[in-house]
């Protein structure tokens, strides 16, 4: 909608083409169209390719486990591997990642064990990895809230004169939240060393982006906050890696925050409880399957002679090993002590919680006694 | 860091001086910042202005922009960034300028501040103090006089405290800043200018304890924050009526000090709770239910709540009709059968 009724043609300004370094056909784009960004080396691209293939195998495996009813839920990132892997590959060891529930493959790529990633999705505990070791915050479920945490951590690092940068992943729908606005604004005002990577997968569960906002791109919003913004082909890992890495360098050198939008597509449903046929067509999904980030890079690497059959076989073998590890970790039953429920709420013990803990312990003892009697009877 | 350590490493005991609650809070933040370089302070107008109530007066000049800063005007942003800072080893002390202006931060407080430690099995503690000037009796316009404590006390993971006097204000804020748990620190606006002679640093009862401010034998009057003064005045007035009123200052709303309050109620056999917040679903309901469940056979009468009415906080010319007064409290106590 526009107030400018005399010039209705101005009401919808078309988005520019997103920045890309490798096109749909797997060809390097000419230098003058690359926005000043350099194509990463073939070695780097091969590494990104390997990580994307492994991540997708994990994603497909976990989706299968969810369909088998072995996980409570799993938000898939199938089709978004370029954004996820480029983001993680741009991190230095001292940097922090602030992911959402959809970014499990980012955790995997930064080294979190499958069993620790899945702890939350299979319902063992709300979150289950070593945050300090990996420098990854818990996966955020409330939208955009983690972006503020990233800004705060980055600001603390700046106050301590550390060269730590925080990177946070957001979805397109999350940019409608007030917390996203506040995070962008605080980051710009405080010149926090933080990078916002928005994966525009075009749907917030079922709601398309044109119902979230009326501007051309999410990246355009950066101008309003006073920070650089980039609209990037989110299925081109080369471009995502080049732009995110440059933004990380800028933040690390005191240049403040950057907002990067990766245009991509969520191939799978929102979660296993979603029915995407209600809000999008198969043709649309097929169109985006045809823009697959892994296939695109594969074409380029093959054209460069970097992806031999031998290399491909070794990557696929790695992916299968990981899938096996992932399946196996599901057979290990985590030891869950119901009494742990009371353990971590406060650092200081509370008598009220101690009473409730004792109550549950008595109930559990009762259950144990009852089941012992039942076992005894059935043994007779 | 335990509170005792914090106080011991503080500057030498100073000569007694007459301090307002606002000045005592100011001194607590200042001393904590001197003792612990990880303490940082930010919020709306807390810098050069020193806060709208001047609680942070002079701190910007003393500690500079890196440790004391004005933030953009956005409460979710203030609390959300404090979380990130705490994750990186800082101890943020943030201010919500007025009670009702803390509501934009509700999600960050309830979904993250309160839950992060439990979510991460203790691996990410959040030592954050969220200061909230609250309650009325200051002639404030709408949104400047809310008593929002029950929103926070209903949330597991938060510690919620409210001082009623300058000595507690200093001691409790020092302990809150030293705590590894997040603390909602509710400052009664109407008491900011109350004075006491203090030799700082002063250490009062531990943060999680209630105190018996005045002993009595007939009834236990339970109050916190702004209504402690009202309760003490009631006890004084009750003497003429031949009634011996014991006054308890809860200080800590969550956790609730069952031991101290329970002992008093078992002694007097009668209890009433006084707060400014509306009655329905208010904090007093929890106190009454809790004391009844645990002390029913000691009680001679039902526990009473003398509170604000179940209406939005009124405009300045009407607030005198809303706030609990000694007369209203004594009238309520007289509804009991005294045999």
Image: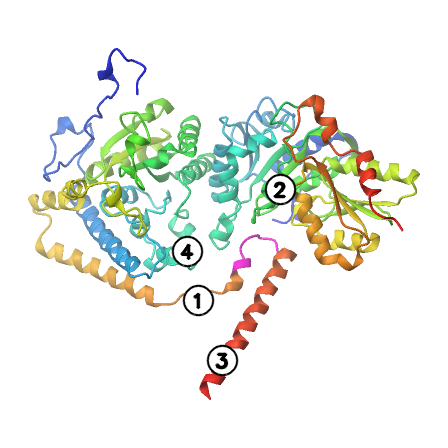
Sequence-first disc among 1 and 3? 1
Residue in the picture at 79% in, 52% down: B265
Q: In what element is the residue under mark 2? A: helix
Q: Chain of mark 4?
A: A
Mark 3 vs mark 4, foreground winner is 3
The residue segment tinted magenta is: A341-349
Sequence-first disc among 1 and 4? 4
Q: Position of residue B237 (x, y in %)?
A: 88, 36
Tell which of B129 and A355 is nearer to you: A355
Q: Which mark is residue A335?
A: 1
Tell which of A233 and B102 is nearer to you: B102
| Image-based side of A366 in relation to A156, left or right | right
Cβ–Cβ under 8 Å for marks 3 and 2: no
* Residue that mark 2 sits on: B150
Q: Is residue A347 magenta?
A: yes
Mark 2 vs mark 1, foreground winner is 2
| Image-based side of B221 in relation to B142, left or right | right
The Cα atoms of the two marked residues, 3 and 2, are separated by 45 Å
Q: In what element is the residue under mark 3? A: helix
Q: Which mark is residue A128?
A: 4
The Cα atoms of the two marked residues, 2 and 1, are separated by 36 Å
Q: Chain of mark 3?
A: A
Circles 1 and 4 on the same subunit: yes
* Residue that mark 3 sits on: A374
Mark 1 vs mark 3, foreground winner is 3
Q: In what element is the residue under mark 1? A: loop
């Amino acid at each position: 909608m526009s107030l400018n009724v005399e010039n209705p043609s101005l009401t919808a300004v078309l988005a520019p083409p997103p920045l890309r370094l490798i096109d749909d056909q797997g060809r390097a784009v000419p230098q003058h169209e690359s926005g000043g960004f350099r194509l990463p080396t073939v070695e780097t691209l091969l590494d990104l390719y390997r990580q994307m293939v492994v991540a997708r195998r994990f994603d497909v495996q976990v989706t299968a486990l969810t369909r088998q009813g072995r996980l409570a839920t799993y938000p898939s990132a199938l089709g978004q591997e370029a954004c996820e892997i480029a983001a993680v590959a741009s991190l230095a060891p001292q940097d922090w990642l602030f992911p959402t529930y959809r970014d499990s493959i980012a955790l995997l790529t930064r080294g979190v064990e499958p069993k620790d990633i899945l702890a939350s999705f299979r319902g063992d505990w709300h979150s289950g990895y070593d945050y300090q070791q990996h420098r990854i915050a818990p996966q955020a479920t409330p939208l955009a809230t983690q972006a503020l945490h990233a800004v705060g951590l980055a600001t603390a690092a700046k106050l301590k004169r550390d060269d730590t940068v925080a990177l946070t992943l957001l979805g397109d729908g999350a940019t409608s939240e007030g917390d996203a606005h506040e995070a962008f604004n605080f980051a710009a005002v405080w010149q926090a060393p933080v990078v916002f990577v928005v994966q525009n997968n075009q749907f917030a569960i079922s709601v398309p982006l044109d119902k979230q906002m009326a501007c051309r791109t999410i990246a355009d919003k950066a101008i309003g906050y006073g920070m650089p913004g980039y609209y990037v082909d989110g299925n081109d890992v080369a471009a995502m890696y080049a732009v995110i890495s440059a933004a990380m360098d800028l933040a690390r050198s005191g240049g403040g925050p950057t907002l990067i939008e990766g245009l991509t597509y969520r191939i799978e449903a929102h979660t296993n409880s979603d029915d995407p046929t209600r809000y999008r067509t198969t043709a649309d999904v097929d169109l985006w399957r045809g823009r697959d980030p892994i296939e695109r890079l594969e074409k380029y690497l093959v054209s460069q002679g970097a992806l031999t059959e031998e290399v491909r076989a070794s990557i696929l073998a790695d992916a299968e090993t990981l899938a096996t590890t992932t399946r196996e970790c599901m057979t290990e039953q985590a030891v869950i002590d119901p009494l742990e429920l009371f353990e971590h709420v406060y650092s200081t013990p509370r008598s009220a919680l101690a009473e409730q803990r004792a109550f549950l312990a008595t109930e559990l003892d009762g259950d144990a006694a009852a089941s012992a009697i039942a076992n005894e009877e059935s043994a007779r | 860091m335990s509170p005792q350590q914090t106080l011991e490493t503080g500057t030498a005991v100073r000569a007694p001086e007459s301090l307002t609650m606002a000045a005592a809070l100011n001194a607590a933040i200042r001393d904590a910042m001197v003792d612990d370089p990880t303490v940082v302070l930010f919020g709306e107008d807390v810098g050069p202005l020193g806060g709208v109530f001047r609680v942070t007066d002079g701190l910007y000049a003393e500690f500079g922009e890196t440790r004391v800063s004005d933030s953009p005007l956005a409460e979710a942003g203030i609390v959300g960034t404090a979380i990130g800072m705490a994750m990186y080893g800082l101890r943020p002390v943030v201010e919500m300028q007025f009670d009702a202006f803390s509501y934009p931060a509700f999600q960050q407080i309830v979904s993250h501040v309160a839950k992060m430690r439990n979510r991460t099995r203790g691996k990410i503690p959040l030592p954050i103090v969220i200061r909230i000037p609250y309650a009325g009796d200051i002639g404030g316009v709408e949104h400047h006089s809310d008593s929002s404590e029950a929103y926070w006390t209903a949330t597991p993971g938060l510690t919620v405290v409210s001082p009623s006097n300058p000595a507690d204000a200093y001691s409790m804020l020092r302990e809150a800043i030293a705590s590894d748990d997040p603390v909602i620190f509710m400052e009664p606006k109407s008491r900011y200018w109350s004075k006491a002679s203090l030799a700082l640093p002063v250490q009062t009862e531990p943060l999680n304890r209630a105190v018996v401010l005045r002993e009595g034998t007939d009834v236990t009057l339970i109050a916190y924050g702004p209504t402690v003064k009202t309760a003490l005045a009631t006890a004084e007035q009750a003497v003429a009526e031949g009634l011996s009123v014991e006054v308890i200052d809860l200080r800590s709303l969550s956790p609730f000090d069952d031991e101290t309050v329970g002992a008093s109620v078992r002694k007097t056999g009668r209890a009433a709770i006084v707060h400014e917040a509306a009655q329905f679903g208010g904090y007093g309901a929890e106190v009454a239910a809790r004391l009844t469940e645990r002390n029913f056979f000691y009680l001679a009468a039902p526990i009473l709540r003398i509170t604000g009415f179940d209406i939005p906080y009124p405009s300045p010319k009407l607030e005198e009709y809303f706030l609990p007064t000694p007369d209203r409290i004594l009238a309520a106590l007289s509804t009991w059968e005294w045999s």
